[in-house]
Image (cartoon, coloured by chain):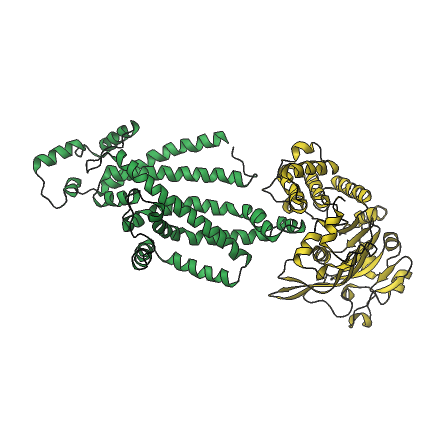
């Protein structure tokens, strides 16, 4: 962290004792010609330095949108943050001017995307795309930026970094490309790293390498990591805490061990039961009946009620279940009226 | 890459002979009485007629005439116009002014269409976007035979902003109005293609990455999006060269610029076969050459394109 002073100038009001990242009651909607899609309806979570928070959920549950809202890179229009706070060290990012917000990106909060082939610009070398960060944010010369880019490629263990820095994204393999993506996110020493399905486009052995690399780098730098995924296996390996999202809400939040041992929300429970297991070979795989609701038409009450085995009348009526405190130490919440029943079984 | 270029150049040689043959045949088929056309309204004596017929091999049939023509061409002799001037000399006179005219027109069209296209794309559906759509549609609907005299009348004569005609040693200032007229015929499609291409690229994943890197909006658009969007635009600019050269025939005629189009128009009117064939063949070669350059430019713009 060579330029903490420069960063302090940019973000007055940063309190080093405040939580690293705190998302409070975040609401995001997409205003399309076909109606308003409520992609995120009250997401809450907390991230501390060195901690890995997994956001888990099916496609379309709002997990990527939440990440984009934190980064401030929603496509507006049609996407709008309508309510809530995103506090970084006590500063509400949503209240910042675009110019200040821009400087938070990559400097303090960085992001890794799913498919590195399409996420990297095809017509510029990786050296250009990495060096650009140093040149534009740190005012370095081209030569200095290139030297730093080679360092970074070394750090993410790309063999022959000195020559590969002049290659184009399409000349890398999938795994190497994702390493470039990681290098790019880490270039300016961010304190928070958001990884949006970083391994989905990779094959299984490469997945493990990339997750291992991410975990190493996170430990070295004591970064807070938000890992967005639908892969429960990946989560179990690396996450400290899990937020399970459904239809734009965090339905359950808990430490990883507790959630796997005793899920408190019927959706989490159903998800865990649908993981194929070796000791259940030959038996029918458990599935969650029905489909996630369209975000333009979320059911009344608890959004999960039409698919829920525990659903009763109370679940079908507004208001939706609040985040009940399941336990204080460790901190656990679940948005289910009957969480005691779910957890008790 | 080298082999690709050699292959394209060899293709060009074939195309050159094909084009000369075709144009020569067309002129030959269309020929009525070139000697009378040369003489105009004046009567022509039998001995004059005989001499001219012999000099231009007019009595020897199509293939022999073509053979004489090609033989001259291969020794660097474009032949003699029916007016008696060496065609080679006429080209040396005509090409520079047309080349300058076309170049100014291309630059004007490219600068306008790219800037306005990008601007429409980032504010799509806005006032500027819709206004530019209407203006470009109007331009698109007006043929050059209307635009050229209209602009000459308005800007050259009534307002007097530009000189209404040009000379052989035309200055930039004299060529500006005709170049604008020429640019008008290609600006509309080039701008619409730029706009569409930028709109498409703005949705790409790498744009999201560039924004996540905390780059300014200007840098995201003019550095990351633009280079990706330019390929279809460059293609169009290459193809539009054909429209520009066709348009030059009318424009040079209207603005009295003694360039290629001017000579070509006169040669067609006077049934001056060798002159038409000479100019058209060079036009064809130039067109092919520019499009080869355009293809090579792709590889410079997009490293994923490689020629084998």
**Who's the residue at 24% across and 44% down the image?**
B266
Image chain in green: B
> Closer to the camera, B164 or A62?
B164
Where residue B204 appears, x then y in whole percent? 60, 50
Q: Which residue is most to the top?
A: B75
Residue at (72, 53) in percent of width and height: A9
Q: Colour of chain A?
A: yellow
Q: Is residue A281 visible?
A: no
The quadrant in which residue B279 appears is top left
| Residue A119 in the figure: left or right of residue B166 | right
Give residue B13's quadrant in the image.
Answer: top left
Vertical arrangement, residue A109 with respect to residue B293, above or below = below
Q: Nearer the viewer, residue B167 or B229?
A: B167
Residue B101 horizontal/vertical position (percent) = 36, 45
Q: How many marks?
A: 0
Q: Position of residue B285 (x, y in %)?
A: 36, 37
At a point 66% along the width and 56% down the height, the residue shown is A99
Residue in the foreground of this view, choosing between A229 and B237: B237
**Left or right, A325 with reference to B229:** right
* B289 over A274 or under it: above or below: above
Q: Quadrant of residue A180?
A: top right
Answer whether residue A226 is visible to the viewer in this image. Answer: yes
Q: Position of residue B244 (x, y in %)?
A: 37, 47
């Amino acid at each position: 962290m060579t330029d903490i002073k420069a960063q302090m100038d940019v973000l007055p009001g940063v309190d080093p004792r405040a939580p690293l990242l705190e998302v409070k009651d975040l609401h995001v909607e997409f205003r399309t010609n076909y109606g308003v899609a409520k992609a995120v309806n009250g997401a809450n979570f907390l991230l501390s330095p060195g901690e890995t928070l997994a956001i888990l959920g099916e496609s379309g549950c709002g997990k990527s949108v939440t990440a984009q809202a934190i980064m401030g890179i929603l496509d507006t229009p049609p996407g709008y943050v309508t309510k809530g706070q995103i506090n970084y060290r006590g500063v509400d990012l949503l209240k910042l001017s675009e110019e200040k917000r821009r400087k938070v990106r990559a400097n303090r909060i960085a992001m890794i995307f799913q498919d590195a082939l399409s996420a990297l610009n095809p017509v510029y070398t990786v050296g250009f795309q990495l060096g650009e960060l140093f040149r534009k944010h740190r005012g370095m010369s081209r030569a200095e930026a290139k030297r730093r880019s080679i360092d970074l490629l070394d750090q993410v263990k790309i063999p022959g970094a000195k020559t590969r820095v002049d290659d184009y994204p399409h000349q890398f393999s999938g795994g190497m490309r994702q390493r470039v993506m990681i290098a790019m996110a880490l270039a300016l020493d961010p304190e928070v790293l958001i990884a949006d399905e970083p391994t989905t486009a990779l094959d299984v052995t490469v997945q493990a390498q990339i997750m291992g690399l991410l975990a190493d780098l996170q430990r070295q730098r004591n970064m807070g990591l938000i890992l967005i995924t639908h892969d429960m296996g990946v989560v179990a390996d690396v996450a400290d805490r899990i937020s399970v999202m459904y239809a734009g809400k965090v339905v359950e939040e808990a430490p990883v061990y507790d959630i796997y041992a005793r899920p408190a929300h019927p959706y989490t429970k159903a998800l865990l039961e649908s993981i194929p297991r070796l000791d259940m070979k030959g038996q029918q795989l458990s599935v969650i009946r029905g489909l996630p609701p369209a975000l333009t038409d979320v059911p009344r009450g608890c959004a999960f009620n039409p698919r829920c085995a525990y659903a009763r009348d109370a679940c079908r009526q507004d208001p939706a279940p609040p985040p009940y405190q399941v336990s204080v130490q460790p901190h656990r919440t679940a948005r289910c009226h009957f969480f005691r029943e779910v957890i008790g079984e | 890459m080298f082999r690709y270029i050699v292959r394209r150049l060899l293709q060009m040689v074939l195309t050159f002979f094909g084009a000369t043959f075709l144009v020569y045949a067309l002129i030959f088929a269309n020929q009525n009485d070139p000697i009378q056309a040369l003489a105009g309204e004046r009567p022509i004596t039998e001995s004059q007629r005989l001499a001219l017929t012999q000099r231009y091999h007019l009595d020897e049939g199509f293939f022999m005439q073509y053979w004489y023509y090609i033989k001259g061409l291969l020794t660097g002799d474009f032949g003699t116009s029916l007016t008696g001037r060496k065609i080679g000399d006429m080209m040396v006179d005509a090409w520079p002014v047309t080349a300058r005219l076309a170049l100014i027109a291309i630059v004007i069209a490219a600068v306008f269409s790219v800037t306005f296209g990008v601007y429409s794309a980032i504010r799509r559906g806005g006032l500027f976007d819709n206004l530019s759509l209407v203006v470009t549609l109007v331009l698109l609907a007006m043929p050059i035979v209307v635009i050229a005299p209209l602009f000459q009348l308005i800007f050259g004569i009534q307002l007097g902003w530009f000189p209404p005609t040009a000379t052989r040693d035309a200055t930039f200032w004299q060529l500006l109005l005709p170049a604008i007229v020429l640019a008008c015929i290609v600006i509309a499609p080039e701008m619409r293609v730029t706009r569409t291409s930028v709109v498409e690229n703005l949705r790409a994943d790498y744009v999201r990455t560039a924004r996540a890197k905390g780059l300014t909006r200007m840098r995201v658009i003019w550095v990351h999006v633009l280079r990706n969007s330019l390929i279809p635009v460059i293609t169009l600019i290459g193809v539009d060269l054909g429209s520009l050269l066709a348009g030059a025939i009318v424009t040079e005629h209207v603005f009295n610029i003694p360039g290629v189009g001017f000579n070509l128009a006169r040669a067609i009117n006077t049934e001056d076969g060798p002159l038409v064939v000479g100019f058209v063949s060079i036009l064809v070669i130039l067109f092919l050459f520019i499009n080869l350059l355009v293809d090579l430019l792709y590889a410079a713009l997009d490293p994923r394109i490689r020629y084998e």
